[in-house]
Amino acid sequence: MKSNYGIIIEARTGSKRFPSKILKKINKKTILELLIDRLITKIPKKKILVATTKKAEDTLITKICKKNKIDFFLGSENNLINRVYSAAKLKKIENIIQITADNPLVNLDIMQNLIKIYFNKKLVFATNSFYRTFPIGSDIRIFKRSILENNEYRVPVKKREHTAFFFFKNFNKIKSFNLSAPKELNRPDIRLTLNYPEDFIVLKKIFLKFKKKKYFNLKKVIKFLDENPKIKKINSKHEKHFKIN
């Protein structure tokens, strides 16, 4: 595929609910490193960029990037829109695949399918999370850098911490697409994201189960949780749906 795209991982340590969550370790590797390990099983390193902040605390993130030979960008802490399009602009990325470091189990087959759909249909925005069918934490968004940048002024300042705010709010007004989960992956009841300590417990059990593999797909994760309902229940009290408002 010759189309110009790059994966931008949003990463910072300043979470209020669970500080430094992406630096928590499983098998001596941070959550961010586990995500990078998964990505590079199918994606060239040159296509990956970590967008973090200029805060001193986030030098720990840049150290991880240097260690793993992954490019990084330092930008605004709270204005994710500016941070992401500025990172993409610097690296001359025209089409952004946005993921977050607190979703270490992102499924690459879904990502590659969404990339093909995005380019084949000549879309402005493609995602698998406008309508929630996949587990929370499987979220992928693809959009044009130019449209993100040119519409920043339309997004209220307090909402600029949500990179895809403009695209979600104008989903039916622009050329958009939402990928629905096939039956075996249609599990919006499952949380695979990292926002609370309980989420970390669940993720740790999953990664330890598949510790011999750098990449394992979403179907295997769902099967493991269904076979271990007590594990699945650990973080079930937390929200199941991404809320952008």
Image (cartoon, grey):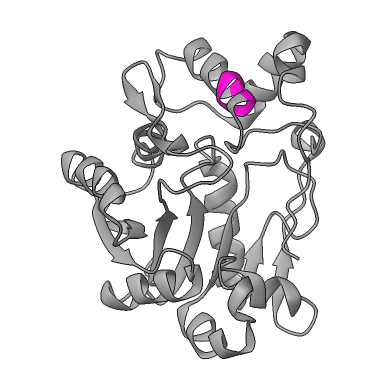
Question: x, y (%) of residue 127?
Answer: 65, 60
Look at 56% across and 18% down and name the residue there: 206
Question: x, y (%) of residue 9?
Answer: 42, 54
Q: Is residue 97 above or below residue 31?
A: below
Residue 142: in magenta span? no
Give left or right: position of 84 versus 206.
Answer: left
Look at 42% across and 32% down and name the residue there: 31
Highlighted range, magenta: 198-202
**Residue 60 versus residue 242: which sits nearer the camera?**
60
Magenta stretch, overall SS:
helix
Q: Is residue 176 above or below residue 30?
A: below
Q: Is residue 8 above or below residue 16?
A: below
Give left or right: position of 25 versus 217.
Answer: left
The quadrant holding residue 94 is bottom left
Question: x, y (%) of residue 66?
Answer: 17, 46
Question: x, y (%) of residue 19?
Answer: 47, 39
